[in-house]
Amino acid sequence: MNCPECDAGLGIPDDAVTGEIVSCPDCGADYEISKEGSDVALKQAETVGEDWGE
């Protein structure tokens, strides 16, 4: 599977589970693995920032 951002090859493990985060070795983008049946898909990982109590 290739990175949607830069088209570099991503090494998705065979035992990857839904919700696992993988990072692109070239551009550093983070993706969340989602499985639909036997198909594996990637979606942009959400980044949750600190609110520092605000």
Image (cartoon, rainbow, N blue to C red):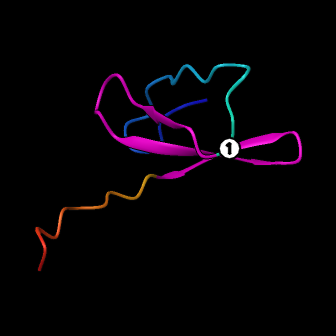
Inspect the image, locate mark 1, and give the three-letter code of the amino acid beneath it: Thr
- At x 10% / y 68%, what residue is drawn? 52
Residue 49 relative to residue 38: left or right: left
- 1 sits left or right of 54 in the view: right
The front one of 28 and 7 is 28
Specify few, some or many for label 1: CA neighbours under 10 Å numbering under 14, 14-19, or 20 or more. Answer: some
Seen at 56% across and 38% down, the residue is: 20
**Residue in the image at 13% along x and 74% along y:** 53
* Residue 35 within the segment the image draws in magenta: yes
Give the extent of the magenta segment: 19-44
Residue 30: image quadrant is: top left
Q: In the rendered image, which quarter is residue 29 located in?
A: top left
Of 1 and 19, nearer the camera is 19
At horizontal 28% and vertical 33% (from top left) the residue drawn is 27
Q: Which residue is mark 1?
A: 18
User: Where does the image place residue 51, in percent across and percent down from the top left?
Assistant: 16, 70
Callout 1 secondary element: loop
